[in-house]
Image (cartoon, rainbow, N blue to C red):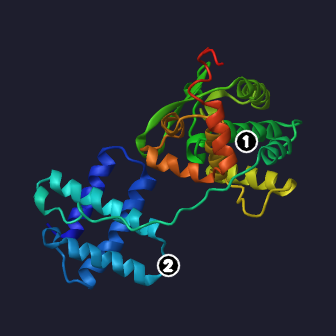
Amino acid sequence: MKIVEAIKEFEFEQQIRGLSKKYISLCQWRLNDWKTYTIDELNIDDVTEVTPRHIKLFIRHRQRLGSEKNITINNRLATLKVFFNFLVELEIIAKEDNPAVDIKNLKEGRTVITTFTDDEVKQLIDSTGSQTYSNIRDKTVLVFMFETGVRVSELVGIKNEDIYIDRIFIRGKGSHERFIYISKKMRRQMKRYERARRLRFEHIPNEFIDDNYFLNQEAEGMSRSNVNKILNRAGKKVSIRKEIRCSPHDCRHYFAQKHIRQGIDVYTLSRLLGHSNIDITAQYLRGLDINDIISIGRKTSPLNDIPIKLI
């Protein structure tokens, strides 16, 4: 099968499986870069002719361009592995002839994730005010981001029907669905927002109001850009360290590291974050210093809850 045809079949399969358009586009972008190099530089246009050496040559090509970190090249390799596994499933390539299966990932540098302090979070949330619908909504958005660790795409995708008494249904990245909790503090803010939303749109017929939980001034679901602007406005009002971008993903970093400092296990945190595996979640452990580790160890000591007698 020609490489061009195989990539189209792969895209069709992903669409049938209901994967997000953004993820499918990312895979296509990576595969098209690989296709261009393989056809133009290696003169190979059939997937059955690709060998492990050809994939290694592509990796070296990306390295020599000098514009990508190892983690980015590893992401390209991950897509190639999924692609060739798909071709094995179709029996276009024999399992033993899969050229990507034994290719090792490049060594990645250990990046320490820096995020907000508790004081910075308080300043950001308090900066929004509480006089208007927009003020109350913006504060609720910030509380959601810091309290649940949801991705911005997940936040704007929440529907009214997804809200339960004690939890929220989240349609996650890559079709991964999960529930997140509603804390008492967040529930109070949600009730205040829901009252403000009801008053703001009480004169608009229901059929003209989107079913999204978070609405803009036109009763339409909010966009990712709207949420980014909320954080940017709040960040300009208060003193946030220069190394913090003040982005929605920084809120997610804060959520993860705060939970870790409070002693949560990595598996539970991984489920709350909607990660596909705990290796991704484990990256947040790098943000802990020795004092954090000692404090967590003290709180989670195995003998803490055992009433033993000591001499």
- Tell me residue 86's x, y (percent): 22, 54
User: Mark 1 and 2 residues: CB-CB less than 8 Å, in contact?
Assistant: no
For the N terminus, the quadrant is bottom left
Q: Is residue 209 visible?
A: no
From the viewer's perspective, is 6 left or right of 232?
left
Q: CA distance from mark 1 to mark 2?
A: 34 Å
Q: Amino acid at mark 2?
A: Ser
* Residue type pointed to by label 1: Leu
Q: Secondary structure at mark 1?
A: helix
Residue identifier under label 1: 142
* Relative side of 159 to 205, left or right: left
Q: Quadrant of residue 175?
A: top left
Residue at image location 68% in from the left, 39% down from the top: 295
Q: Nearer the viewer, residue 81 or 106?
A: 106
Looking at the image, is 14 positioned above or below residue 37?
above
Q: Identify the image quadrant of residue 39.
A: bottom left
Q: In the rendered image, which residue does mark 2 sit on?
A: 67
Using the image, determine if residue 265 lies above or below residue 121. above
- With respect to residue 199, does 153 lie above or below? below
**x and y percentages locating residue 303 in the rendered image:** 58, 24
As drawn, which residue projects farthest toward the front? 311
- Within the image, what quadrant is residue 206 found in? top right
Please state the horizontal and vertical placement of residue 24, each as a whole percent of the image: 38, 56
- Total labels drawn: 2
